[in-house]
Image (cartoon, rainbow, N blue to C red):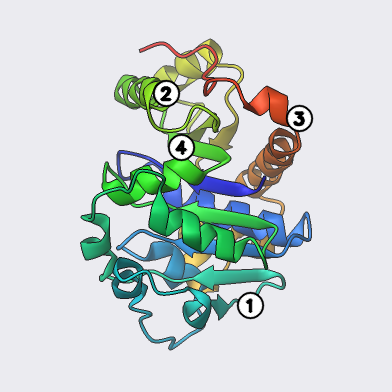
Amino acid sequence: MGVIAVYSRNGGAGKTTLAVNLAWASARLSQHSTLLWDLDPQANATFVMSPEGAAASRFGVALAFQVGMEQFIRHTSTPKLALLPADGSLKAAGALSVGPAGGRVRMLVQQAQRAYGRIIIDCPPGMSGLNDEVLLVADLIIVPVVPSAMSMRALADLAAELNKSLNRNAVLMPVFTMVDRRRASHRQLLAKHLDFPVIPVNDSVELMSDHKTALGAFAPRSDAARAYATLWRTIEVRLLEPQAAQSQPAPLPNVQR
């Protein structure tokens, strides 16, 4: 139990920021050997976590032909944290249809689990066969939700799809992101969904690209870094829950459109 997909159908929800900070927390706070797998063709997680001057990986081409991942994995500056980088070639891979059992992604995840205790997958935004494959094999699906009616509607639709056809065994964990408590609309939604973890908006997030690492490494006392650390502890508890508890249809507590 340790495959975590960070997924959002809408861009701009803080998906990549969430994936990077959770991967860092896994490696540094829990000391897990961790793989951050960037599947987003925009490659923002790769930009933040790659060594300076690293060449494009072209892993999207390899993925289309079911080539193994080992030759593409890079070390990061964070101990115990490795990166499977993304690049524009993933656009073609994302258009491929899903197999009946999430074949290509499942095969690669099984390979990665031999070396890594936690695998954090930064999914591309939107719907695609590739995303369906990821959701099929994930133990935990983290969904960043900017507090808004449209985001809540997309979240409810995703929960319904998981329960019907995709992955009834995965645990779905919505996370409010980019929260500004000065906004009445944000406060109202937070009050309706007290069980959702909250990540506050923070200017330090914009500096991640400059520092080439997660918030916990250069701004550990920021509100956002502390929120990510708390969220990671919650995730660890969910992953360690008995298998019987995770065999129920994907739970989505207190969701209203």
> Which amino acid does the dot numbered 2 rest on?
Ala
**In the rendered image, which residue does mark 3 sit on?**
242
Q: Residues within 10 Å of mark 1 (few under 14, many from 20)?
A: few
Closer to the chain start, of discs 1 and 4, is 1
Residue 159 image label? 2
> Which amino acid does the dot numbered 4 rest on?
Pro
Q: Residues within 10 Å of mark 3 (few under 14, many from 20)?
A: few
- The x, y position of residue 143, in whole percent, is 46, 36
- Residue 152 in sight: no
Residue 144 image label? 4
> Which amino acid does the dot numbered 1 rest on?
Ser
- At mark 4, the secondary structure is strand
Front of the two marks 3 and 4: 3
Closer to the chain start, of discs 4 and 2, is 4
> Which amino acid does the dot numbered 3 rest on?
Pro
Closer to the chain start, of discs 3 and 4, is 4
Q: CA distance from mark 1 to mark 4?
A: 26 Å
Q: Residues within 10 Å of mark 4 (few under 14, many from 20)?
A: many
